[in-house]
Each structure stands twice: as C-alpha cells, then as structure tokens.
Image (cartoon, rainbow, N blue to C red):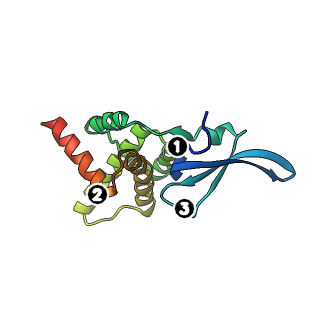
Amino acid sequence: MFKVNDVVVYGAQGVCKILDVEEKEFMGEKREYFVLRPVDNQKSTYFVPMNNENLLSKKRELLSKEEIDELIDSMPNQNANWITNDSERKEKYKCIISDGNRVELIKIIKAIYFEKKRREENKKRLTSSDERFLNDAEHVLHGEFQYVLGLDEAQLMEYISERIEKRGA
C-alpha cells in the first residue's frame, strides 16, 4: 500500500509524490483522499479517493533502473502497428495512456513516430490528436525514466540511443 512521501506514477499525470492523506466532505459524504502532486508541475494537485478502485489502479510504483534498462533493451523488438481507423486509434491510445502500461506506451510512441516520418515524406503533418497522444505517452514514460535515472530529456534520449546501439552491435 502506498503512503505519504511515496513517489508513484499516476495515470496520464505521470510521476507524482503523495503529499498527504486527507479527509474531505463532498456532497455530504466524508471520504479519505490521497493528495498527489506531479514532480514536474508544482501547481497541480490531484485528490484520489481511497475507496475508488478504478482511480487507485492508475497509481503504480516506479520502475527500478534495471526494469527501465530492460524496457529500453526491448524497444527495438516492440511492434508498432498503426491503427488506421481514427476513432479506434483514439480510443485505444486514450486507454493505454490512462492505464500506463509501459510496453504499450512504447508501442504508441513508435507507431506515431513512424507515422509522423511517413507523413513528413509526403509533406503532411500528424493530426493534432496524434501529436497530443505522442506528447502524453512520452510525458508519462519519459517522465518516469528521467525521475528514476536522474536525467533531463536530452540526457535521457542520449541514454536510450546509446543503450539501443550497444544492444544492436
């Protein structure tokens, strides 16, 4: 069970610190809430009801450095299938980002990245929703990697590239 001062990944919000557990009254009913604050946005605060299993299931422990390295090593082997149906793609991506499955986030990033390259070759741009999904997936995945590894975005991208190159050599 999570406790105050733990750092967790919370759905699409990314890496958050549990600041407190508070009792609040909402619509005449008292409930206990986890109070979460994103580590990269000190202005936001999320109140997660402790009795809402759906919302609590979006809270996950941070990966270890070893687990991150395993995920990075698996990146070249992840299939990145583009979903051509816009509404189907939007629904699937929304669920994956909300659930935060790291392997599925990698697949989203790869699929959108390859589609973006394909469109650029044809002098076209990604749709705004695909750009947003790419940004959201990178925010969650890269944010966790950066926090655990103690790297900024540029350092993280270099770390990932070097690790993949070594594995391919």
134 displayed left or right of 124:
right
Q: Which quadrant would the N terminus be assigned to in this image?
A: top right
Dot 1 amino acid type: Val
The answer to whether mark 2 and mark 3 are in CB contact below 8 A is no
Tag of residue 42: 3
Residue at image point 41% right, 57% down: 135
Q: Which quadrant would the C terminus be assigned to in this image?
A: top left
Dot 3 amino acid type: Gln
The answer to whether mark 1 and mark 2 are in CB contact below 8 A is no
- Label 1 secondary element: strand
Q: Measure how far apart labels 2 and 3 are at the Cα level.
A: 22 Å
89 displayed left or right of 35:
left
- Label 2 secondary element: helix
Residue at image point 55% right, 49% down: 17
Q: Confirm whether residue 154 shows in the render.
A: yes
Among numbered discs 1 and 2, the one appearing first in the sequence: 1
Q: Quadrant of residue 6?
A: top right
Q: Measure how far apart labels 1 and 2 are at the Cα level.
A: 23 Å
| 121 is higher (above) or lower (below) than 144 | below
17 displayed left or right of 109:
right
Q: Residues within 10 Å of mark 2 (few under 14, many from 20)?
A: few
Among numbered discs 2 and 3, the one appearing first in the sequence: 3
Dot 2 amino acid type: Ala
Q: Measure how far apart labels 1 and 3 are at the Cα level.
A: 15 Å
- Residue 11 screen position, x and y as percent: 54, 46
Q: Quickly name the residue at label 2.
A: 154
- Residue 145 screen position, x and y as percent: 38, 46
Residue at image point 70% right, 40% down: 52
Farthest residue, direction front? 5
- Residue 100 screen position, x and y as percent: 49, 42
Q: Quickly name the residue at label 1.
A: 8
